[in-house]
Amino acid sequence: MPKESDNAKGSDNAKGAIMPKGATMPANENPFIIENIQPCVDGGRFPVKREVGDVLTVTAAVFRDGHDAVNVLLKYKEKHDGGKWHETDMHCINPGLDVWSGGFRIEKNTRYLYTIAACTDIYRSWLNDATKKAQAGQNIKSELREGLILLENTIARVADEEDAAYLANVAAMLKKEMESSGKKKNPAGIKPSGRKSQDEILKIFSDSLLGDFMVRCAAREDLTEFAPALEVVADRVRARYAAWYELFPRSQGRAPGKSGTFKDCIARLPEIKEMGFDVVYLTPIHPIGITKRKGPNNCLTAGPGDPGSPYAIGNAAGGHKAVEPGLGAIEDFREFERACRAVGMEIAMDFAINCSPDHPYVSKHPDWFFKRPDGTIKYAENPPKKYEDIYPLNFYAPGGAWESLWVEMRDVILFWVNQGVKIFRVDNPHTKPVPFWRWLIEDIQREHPDVIFLAEAFTRPPMMRALAKAGFTQSYTYFTWRNFKGELTEYFTELTQSPAAEYMRGNLFTNTPDILPKMLQEDGRAAFKMRLVLAATLSSVYGIYSGFELCENSAVDGKEEYLNSEKYEFTVWDWDRPGNIKDFIASINKIRRENPALHLYKNLRFYQADDENILFYGKSTEDGKNIVLVAVNLDPFGTHDSLLHIPIDEFGIKPDENYELHNLITGQRSLMTGNQFHVSLNPDIESSFLFRLERWGEKEEKFDYFGM
Amino acid sequence: MPKESDNAKGSDNAKGAIMPKGATMPANENPFIIENIQPCVDGGRFPVKREVGDVLTVTAAVFRDGHDAVNVLLKYKEKHDGGKWHETDMHCINPGLDVWSGGFRIEKNTRYLYTIAACTDIYRSWLNDATKKAQAGQNIKSELREGLILLENTIARVADEEDAAYLANVAAMLKKEMESSGKKKNPAGIKPSGRKSQDEILKIFSDSLLGDFMVRCAAREDLTEFAPALEVVADRVRARYAAWYELFPRSQGRAPGKSGTFKDCIARLPEIKEMGFDVVYLTPIHPIGITKRKGPNNCLTAGPGDPGSPYAIGNAAGGHKAVEPGLGAIEDFREFERACRAVGMEIAMDFAINCSPDHPYVSKHPDWFFKRPDGTIKYAENPPKKYEDIYPLNFYAPGGAWESLWVEMRDVILFWVNQGVKIFRVDNPHTKPVPFWRWLIEDIQREHPDVIFLAEAFTRPPMMRALAKAGFTQSYTYFTWRNFKGELTEYFTELTQSPAAEYMRGNLFTNTPDILPKMLQEDGRAAFKMRLVLAATLSSVYGIYSGFELCENSAVDGKEEYLNSEKYEFTVWDWDRPGNIKDFIASINKIRRENPALHLYKNLRFYQADDENILFYGKSTEDGKNIVLVAVNLDPFGTHDSLLHIPIDEFGIKPDENYELHNLITGQRSLMTGNQFHVSLNPDIESSFLFRLERWGEKEEKFDYFGM
């Protein structure tokens, strides 16, 4: 039912006059309900995440009172470009539940805003009703006059002269027909000599070109828009798909008791590249504190040659913007960064907000630290434990000091961004304010949307999710502590299928300098290979900490910690030592590269394997062209057999259709019909079965000449 | 870590100076994350509903960075009283997921706002750390000085002189002890002669009275409050628990072809009361249009004596604020209303926004209607169907006319509220703007919070939910079209257990003037009794349309409509005609009254019955003192037997414990052990088994004298 556009609403005073008390009168321009928008995090309080090249598909329930035809639009714009909104039509995909769907392709690494708007399609509503009446043989003279008024009102609104002329022509012609038809008082539907019947006139109104035009030029007076708009962080693809290799730069040398250098790191790049990694993640490279420096195996006193933990940052040589002289100069770092980039890898840097007592901040910004009543600065504690080699920064520092501290932290990141670093692994972000991260990450990404932040928080689930919502691109996970079928299935279903998957990407590390999982301590190569396959295929982004490829598993007795950890000493490795699994890692990373299904995060699905020790899952691309299935024997100590139930239904394969299973590790191929496949997984040979499901060629009837 | 309260933040200019570009710096006072608040509708966009006497239990995940002790508060206030916030402590019920819970009793029929606030418990954080250090034998001299500073800072904030004096005393005493302890340089924990050790001083700090005091007087500088606050509509209990009886006032007379009157209605009250109903719902009582009046069985032409449909409202005698003269005068209506109230029942009125062509609005407010190009007013249509006896109102009427229309509609409600009507059944609300209802209902309830609105919308689920979110107290449901075990289980699980149950209460009607369900047409008494039990026990609020008690089931052939419907004629009923189920209805309503579990809406749970025709479910009060179980044979044509699996676990009954099943319809009692109970339900005798589970008396060992 059309509303007139040029009629002013009663003024607020007038409203007051009729409504002696009570609620403010709502506007009546917004009759639409737009609800349950997906994706949407916490009612729009936080952005969702996607990657460049994705189509952001948005659905919502959209409806209004009555049964008018409606137009529903998906609107989107870049958040920071100050530009205008784009619009794309949404389509009703479930009329019974009023569900509409639409999407747009994410072309750029930036943040977008998106929302949904709806308005009544006045022209189509009128046309639908008029058509139904005409079809029932009713006289629609009055309806046709309404249609003409709609046309005439539209002409007044059209800016383009040619368009206006086209519409004016149509309107004039229709008017002439209708007037003459009126004069002759002919009964409905009966055609007077030389004049158009009401059905013929309606046919002109029903022209689809005219209809589209009327929609495009509609006044949209009751346009209802969901507000505030929702946000999507469009990261680059590496935010979702990458293999990380973590190393201590100082352990890349050859001389015992002496620091490796960035030059040594450069020498190692071909080997890391050959294993198929994309990201070389460096533990902190800054000058290390001297006061209360930790010795080997975290002992309280360091010997004269002990390098200390790189996490106790800062000494007279500088702090977070400086490089530990033992590694080289900043120019050496730059050279290393360029060398990485030259072979198609990139650096991830450790952002550990820990200051040693010797950090320049201590003397220059004592107000950034916690103080005792006597004015001395507090070291870190987790009472009764003391960490005297670390002075924690106070992110709530009084007197406005927190502001300059926050800005300095942002500037540390910017400094390294300017050295070419675009990935930061953030140490213990959960001990700093969440609003700090939200501000810092958006502030950096406004100018540098390609910067990736990985949150190293192994804390309770709500805080881990809160950091991801606040902006962290990726998150560490509990992967190292998930080893059995039930817990793996549950945890990875949650990580990839729950609402959290809209904003949190789990980066699975098999091990870290702080975590040598029990599973890897217990058994050798079989466990390492099994956990690698899990990490590399359960998530599209994963990492290993160097030594993993050597199956290094010397632990501190009874703990999940490395013995003689690189954290406290110079280590020299034999990177080719016997028993290493470098070739296996290279083959798995190659399989990842060659199979686009493994580049995706949210496409993980678990399938049925009858044996409790065998985990069976798969990933496929949306077009169904790449399907990878994985069966892993989770028990590194024994062989297990199982029937795998291949979800052929899901892949659109009929029970009697042939297909092929291509074992991507061995190269072996099996021809298949039906959904049952038997595996026997002997960890001494291979714990995992990683295969690509390939459709068999076309049948004869698909070809043209079959019917000839 | 305490922040100093008297230090001003850097000004905005200062911020600008350090941050040449980028995001606005967030405030650092709000480090807490408060998320996943339950209950909460659409992220707080709409209120939840509760009833007076309920405890509103609120849970949320609340946390911040670090490991400080925190205080979490549930805050609430009346929305319209302009008064102050109340606070109650929340408690951590799941530390691993940071879930906190708290609640407040709803004392008043009004709207409340509620939210959650959290702040760091600086004193307890300090005390926890100091205690751990002291327990580990560390010197805590500096920590004790910090504690003293906390005390001294608090004194400065305490308004009450006595409190301040108490605190000053404690502080002075502690200071003296600590200074002297300092002078003597005694080693930690060793008590110098006559002076307190650090442990003894800490014990004073640890006094729980002092602790509570410090919490109460805390500066709460980092208080983080969830905003905007959420809302709860606290209705009166009748919004949740009532039995409705719908009637046509004009059919309550005795003389054929003549209108019954309000006096006739008064005469029927004792009978309705005896059946156990709480609400007498009247179809429209206003003057009925004459133009295009409908005749019997909805025929297009009415005879001279035909009364017309009461839903075509308005003639020269008046409109929505007038009474049809055939029923009596407004004074008669008032008398009827008083008579209802006198026997503990109340009236529900039909609010049908339909105008006949003769409604006074047509001449007084032609701008409220839809017009044709020639200026005439449009009748209602659903093309190609025409409803020429109705002129629909245009809730979007241009030129500001909609505003005066909305206000008039509000005033119609107010008019009847002033006549004592506090319940309105709203006809077809889904054809009017949702924002209109949101405004109208809150506007009425601000002054009259006891007014109840029932939405008669049998439309798609999203609109039904939208109307409930917008403020409707109750909603009609699809109950009449849910007849089988699977669909009943699914639908009522959704209605009572899904998020929608927070704001939508289904009022189950067994039948309406427009709906004579197939199930009732097919079979006689058995089906009527079976559907009554379902309606009366699946929901706490239900209704029948009169005639149901007589098992009236004459239908228009092939339709779910009544033959010779009261909607179009004067009907005279024999209210005692043979085959009626008035006694049965009375007994079911009595069972409802006597069992508080049946007064609740969200406590419905389905249990296992092995037979596909037998639906088994139950309701219990939160304290477990009243447990009602219902088994219904859904097949009115045949006897079915089933094992019922009684959920004794849920009720805390051990497998070897005795209990009693008390058949509330027959009075029969069965002693039980274990969870298996066999029923045979013969519809010719009784389709339903409605029993109360009663715990057996105490065992001998519970009594004092057992041990004597």
Image (cartoon, coloured by chain):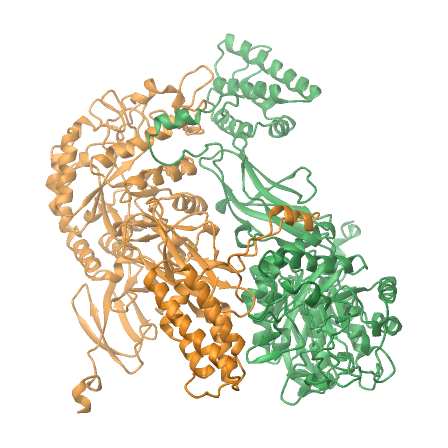
Chain colours: A green, B orange
Left or right: residue B590 compared with residue B433: left
Residue at the top extreme? A183
Q: Position of residue B43 (x, y in %)?
A: 48, 51
Q: Is residue B566 visible?
A: no
Where residue B379 appears, as percent x and y from the top left, is: 39, 24
Q: How many marks?
A: 0
Estimate the x, y position of residue A49 in percent, counting from the top left. 64, 55
A635 relative to A35, above or below: below
> Which residue is more in the foreground, B255 or B658?
B658
Q: Is residue A39 visible?
A: yes
x 70%, y 63%: residue = A364
Left or right side of B590 for B130 = right
Query: In the displayed image of the protein, which residue is found farthest to the bottom?
Result: B708
Q: Nearer the viewer, residue A649 or B280?
A: B280
* Residue B105, above or below B14: below
Which quadrant of the figure has residue B214?
bottom left
